[in-house]
Image: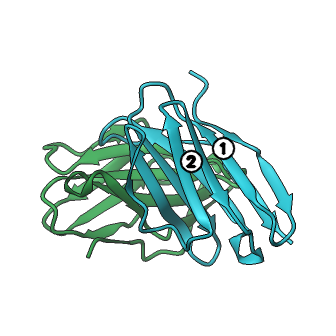
Chain colours: A green, B cyan
Amino acid sequence: AQKITQTQPGMFVQEKEAVTLDCTYDTSDPSYGLFWYKQPSSGEMIFLIYQGSYDQQNATEGRYSLNFQKARKSANLVISASQLGDSAMYFCAMRFKTSYDKVIFGPGTSLSVIP
Amino acid sequence: DAGVIQSPRHEVTEMGQEVTLRCKPISGHDYLFWYRQTMMRGLELLIYFNNNVPIDDSGMPEDRFSAKMPNASFSTLKIQPSEPRDSAVYFCASSPQLRGYTFGSGTRLTVV
C-alpha cells in the first residue's frame, strides 16, 4: 500500500535557524514524484518543491531543499534561515505515475518559528 | 494566469439541502483533483479527472457525493443531501502531468 508518514506533528525553530521536516513514504511503484506544500493559517495550499524519483540531484528552491534518500524512502524538507512567515502546516505528498498520477498527502507537520 | 478558481469561498447550508461546489482549473492543465480537508482526517483525495474523464473516484465518501467535468474549464462537486459531517474545506487543484499542482483557495462548507 502507498503511504506517507510525517512523524513530527509539531516543530519549533528559532528565527534564522535551519529546520528539517521529516517525510517517509512507502511504495512499490518505480516512478513517482515527491512534493512539499505549505499551508499558512489563511488556508491556501502553496507548492514549495518537487523531486522526481529518478532525479539524480536533490531539489532546491531558494531557502527550501529536499533531502531525498531513495533507498531509505525519505524526502525530508530543509528550510534554511527560518523566517516568521514560515510558520505554517507543511505537507509531504507523493504522486504515482503508474497509478494514473494519483497523489496522496501525509498528515502534516505544524512549524512554529520563534522570534 | 488567474490560478485555480473555486466558488463559493464559503457556504453555509442546512442539513438535507443540495450543495454544489465549482472549480475552474488552470488552462492547459490535464488533471483536476477534488480534495477534502478536516482536522480529523487531514487531506483526502475524493476524485480526480484526466482530460475531463474521471480516473479514480474511490475517495468519494458515499453516493451522496458526485462530481462532473463537462469540459476542460469547469468541474463541479455536488453533495445531495448534505449532512453536518460533510462540513470541511473542499479544495480543487489542477496540474500538468506529474509536476506539483496548483490548489484553489478552497470552499469552506458548513452544514448546520
- Can residue A10 be seen by looking at this rendering? no
- Seen at 12% across and 58% down, the residue is A30
Q: Crowding near pointer 2: few (<14 within 10 Å), some, many (20+)? A: many
- Seen at 76% across and 60% down, the residue is B18
Q: Chain of mark 1?
A: B
Q: Is residue A69 above or below residue A3?
A: above
Q: Position of residue B16 (x, y in %)?
A: 80, 71
Return the residue found at the far top: B1
Mark 2–mark 1 Cα distance, whole angstroms, equals 9 Å
Q: Is residue B112 above or below residue A53?
A: below
**Up-down: is B76 above or below B86?**
above
Q: Nearer the viewer, residue B15 or A53?
A: B15
Among the 4 quarters of the image, the one containing residue B37: bottom right
At horizontal 73% and vertical 69% (from top left) the residue drawn is B81
Few, some or many residues within 10 Å of mark 1 (<14, 14–19, 20+):
many
Residue at the image point whose x is 49% and y is 71% from the top: A107
Query: What label does residue B75 carry, if any?
Result: none
Query: What residue did someone put label 1 on?
Result: B22
Quadrant of the image containing the N terminus of chain A:
bottom left
Rendered location of residue B106, percent (x, y): 66, 49
Q: Is residue A108 above or below residue A34?
A: below
Give x and y (percent) for residue A71.
13, 66
Inspect the image, locate mark 1, and give the three-letter code of the amino acid beneath it. Arg
Tell me where residue A46 sits by quadrant.
top right
**Residue A27 visible in the displayed image:** yes
Query: According to the image, label 2 marks what residue?
Result: B92
CB under 8 Å between discs 2 and 1: no
Q: Chain of mark 2?
A: B
Q: Secondary structure at mark 2?
A: strand
| Element under disc 1 | strand
A60 to the left or right of A112:
left
